[in-house]
Image (spheres, rainbow, N blue to C red):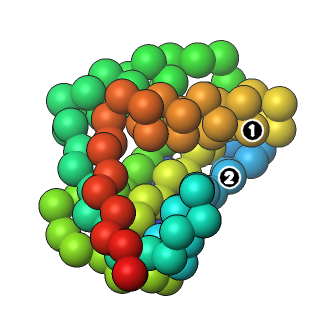
Amino acid sequence: MNANELISKIKTHPEYEKVGMILCHNGVVRGTSRDGRNVSGLRVAANMEQLDKVLAEQRARPGIIDIQVEIAADRDLKVGDDVMLLVVAGDIRDNVIQVLGDTLNAIKHTVTAKTEFFI
């Protein structure tokens, strides 16, 4: 996974001159679960059709020029590995920050499912 590659892809968008902010989220495998148990790694499943729907919906929001995402799906990940890169480009901070949060939450709730491996 490479955030610079996703940003470079955004920079080729035909409306890139409207971009005033690019915001990135880089999710990584934590060493502990939300309930505090030690984790050795995890595996993520992703519904790519649902991801396409989420991205289409979020890209249509005011001020958003492009959204790129990469998910490390269907492979075993260890602590410290990248799980997901999400890059949102848009006109102003208020629009971009809101859409990054909304897109991230939609992906986590409707696109991906994770299985944690405990120590």
Quadrant containing the N terminus in the rendered view:
bottom left
Would you place residue 56 above or below residue 4 in this image?
above
- Expressed as whole percent of the image width and height from the top left, the position of residue 60 reads 50, 17
Would you place residue 25 above or below residue 54 in this image?
below
Res. 55 mark: none
Residue 13 shown left or right of residue 88 in the figure: left
Quadrant containing the C terminus in the rendered view:
bottom left
Residue at left offset 32%, top offset 70%: 117
- Expressed as whole percent of the image width and height from the top left, the position of residue 37 reads 52, 69
Q: Which residue is mark 1?
A: 97
Foreground residue, 38 or 80?
Answer: 38
Distance from Cα at disc 2 to Cα at disc 1: 7 Å
Determine which quarter of the picture holds residue 51. top left
Foreground residue, 15 or 42?
Answer: 42
Residue 75 shown left or right of residue 38 in the figure: left
Res. 23 mark: 2
Q: How many numbered marks appear?
A: 2
Name the amino acid type tagged 2.
Leu
Find out whether the residues at labels 2 and 1 contact each other: C-beta distance under 8 Å. yes
